[in-house]
Amino acid sequence: MNTINSLNSASILETLEKALPDPFFIIDSNGFYLEVLGGAENSLYDSAKYLKGKNLRDIMTLEKADFFFDVLNKAISQRKIQIVEYSLSSADCFGNPMDGPAQTQWFEGRVYPVEGFGADEINAVVWVAINITQRKTAEKEKDELIDKLEKAIEEINVYKKLIPICSYCKKIRDKQDKWHSFESYLHKNTDISFSHGICPQCKTKLYSELNLKE
C-alpha cells in the first residue's frame, strides 16, 4: 500500500490544517463557526482556533458582524461565490490571542456556499481569508503617487498659462518673442472679439471739459 492510500481522512485534514498558510472557516447560516482550518502563517494571521463554536456576534463588533452576515447570506441565497475585501485588526476580534501582525490587515474573503447533507438546501459557507495587505499598501502608495503627479501637472499647466505682459504698455509677448497689443493677442489666440466704449473714469479724465452726458 502506497503512502497516499494509507492516509485516512483525519490525517489528511490534520496535514492540511498544519500546512495551509491561509485560514478558512466553515460558517453556518446562523453565523456559527463550525470549523476552523489552516492559518499556519503567523506573520500574516492571528491564530483562529478560538473561533470554533463561537458566533460572529460573539467575537466582533455589531458593524463587522453585520458585514459578515450580509456576505454569507448573499452566498447562500444566490448560490454563488462572493468575493469581498475588508480590514481587520486584532482589536476588532474579541478573545483574539493577538499572536499575529500588530497592525490592521486587509483580507480578500472568498465565500463559497455549501449544500446541506441529504438535502438541496444550502445552509453554510466556506470562507477563505487571504491576506492582501501588501497589495493594498502598494495600491495606496500608487494612488498617492498619482495624486502627487496630477497636482504637479496642474501646477505646470498654471505656469504654462502665465502670459508675459509689458508692465508699461501692456503689450503681450508670444512664443516667438513678438509683442502684440492686448486686443490683437487675444483675437489671434482666442475666439474673443472686442467692442469699444469708454468707462466713467476715463470719460471724466479725458472729456470732463465737454460735460458729456451719460
Image (tube, rainbow, N blue to C red):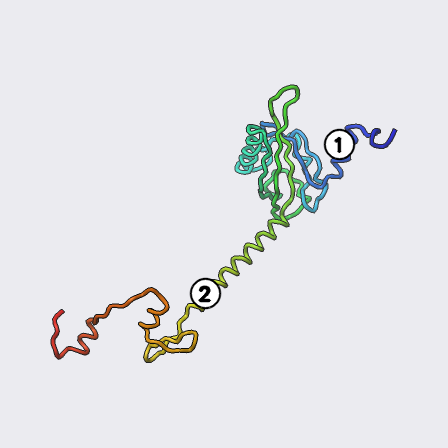
| Residue furthest front as drawn | 188
**Number of other residues with Cα within 10 Å of mark 1, as a class: few under 14, some 14 to 19, many 20 or more:** some
Q: 19 or 195, which lies in front?
A: 195
Mark 2 is on which residue type? Asn
Q: Is residue 26 above or below residue 193?
A: above
Q: Quadrant of residue 162?
A: bottom left
| Residue furthest right as drawn | 1
Left or right: residue 110 versus residue 16 is left
Left or right: residue 62 versus residue 44 is left
Q: Is residue 106 above or below residue 121?
A: below
Disc 2 to disc 1, C-alpha distance: 62 Å
Q: Secondary structure at mark 2?
A: helix
Where, quadrant-wise, is the C terminus in this rendering?
bottom left
**Number of other residues with Cα within 10 Å of mark 2, as a class: few under 14, some 14 to 19, many 20 or more:** few
Residue occupied by mark 2: 157
Q: 47 or 187, which lies in front?
A: 187
Q: Secondary structure at mark 1?
A: helix
Mark 1 is on which residue type? Leu
Residue 13 badge: 1
Locate residue 70, reporting x and y percent. 54, 33
Q: Name which residue lies at 46% across and 62% down.
A: 154
Left or right: residue 11 versus residue 58 is right
Locate residue 169, reporting x and y percent. 32, 79
